Image: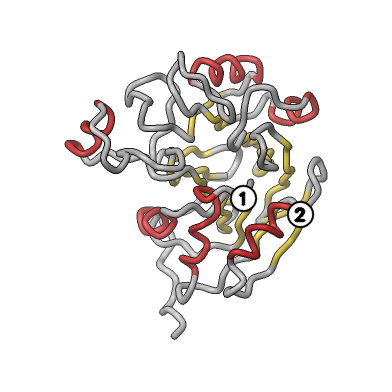
Amino acid sequence: MEVRLLGTGDAVGTPKIGCACPQCRTARETGRERLRTSLLLTIGGRRLLVDTGPDLRRQLLDACSPAIDAAIWTHGHYDHFMGFGEFYRVQEPPPVHAAPEVLEYCARIFSFLSFPQFAHEPFEPFDLCGARVTLVPVNHPPQPTYGLRIEADGAVLAYTADTRADIPAASFELLRGADLLLIDAIAPPGYRIHKHMTYDQALALAARLEPTEFRCVHLAHLMPWDLPHLGRDGETFVLGDHAPGPCPPAPGEPRL
């Protein structure tokens, strides 16, 4: 299973429009960016998106324009699903999987597109693109939000989505002991964040979850570039038994 971080930023990304903070200045001077957080998984030649944020077109171009076999929506916030319209006239919109309330809300926004929709209850595993996927409730008030446990090729990926540290006990157990943990860390220590974790809170939760490796994602422009364990846009991990092949060819001609 290959896991590519398509983006590692929060809802506004880095650099933030109109901001002159040190991180945003560095971003503009060096060309570094944090696009909105989403993932691309490649499993046995099939490609699965986790969230479809507003930077999706750019992210897929950077990933060699793969055709997407399916997508998962973790919750109904703008920065996690609003890029789904980028599939219009590019490829057949892929099937989308989500919790019932998430799917109902997000699919209504994209009523102009026809695409297969599959609702799944939390804690009930389902098979998708060669993986075993479980929706894991997390705590991102007031929006119903789900992390993921994804098992493929003998490895486990755990993803917290947007969350506070006080996740339900059953969810903690499903996220524990992963080969790779991707965890929300929106701001540096010292900030008061109601719906997310600060960097120190994320590190503390990661220590309790005991993954083999972890990265912090969903990073605001406030986060310095050089802290340990921060994910980088385009960073790629190969987990388990089977490494994917080379970068896939671009999809066929767009439908007119």
How packed mark 1 is, by other alpha carbons closer than 10 Å (few <14, some 14-19, many 20 or more), is: many
Q: Which residue is mark 2?
A: 100
Please tell me in which quadrant of the rendered image residue 103 appears. bottom right
> Relative to residue 238, is residue 52 depicted above or below?
below
Residue 222: image location, x then y, percent:
36, 27
Residue 178: image location, x then y, percent:
65, 29
Viewer-closest of 98 and 61: 98
Q: Which residue is mark 1?
A: 76
Who's the residue at 60% across and 40% down the image?
Answer: 241
Q: Quadrant of the N terminus?
A: top right
Q: Is residue 150 visible?
A: no
Who's the residue at 56% across and 37% down the image?
Answer: 239
Who's the residue at 55% across and 32% down the image?
Answer: 182
Which three-letter amino acid code belongs to the residue tagged 2?
Pro
Residue 141: image location, x then y, percent:
66, 35
Residue 73: image location, x then y, percent:
62, 51
In the displayed structure image, the side of residue 35 where residue 205 appears, left or right: right
Who's the residue at 44% across and 71% down the image?
Answer: 251
> Relative to residue 66, is residue 24 depicted above or below?
above
Q: Earlier in the sequence, mark 1 or mark 2?
A: 1
Q: Is residue 112 visible?
A: yes
Q: Quadrant of the C terminus?
A: bottom left
> Relative to residue 25, is residue 11 depicted above or below?
below
Task: Report the Cα–Cα distance between label 1 and label 2.
Answer: 11 Å
- SS at mark 1 in the image: loop
Viewer-closest of 18 and 211: 18
Q: Which color scheme is applied?
A: secondary structure
> Relative to residue 58, is residue 153 depicted above or below?
above
Which three-letter amino acid code belongs to the residue tagged 1?
Gly
User: Residue lying furthest left in this view?
Assistant: 29
Please tell me in which quadrant of the rendered image residue 116 appears. bottom right
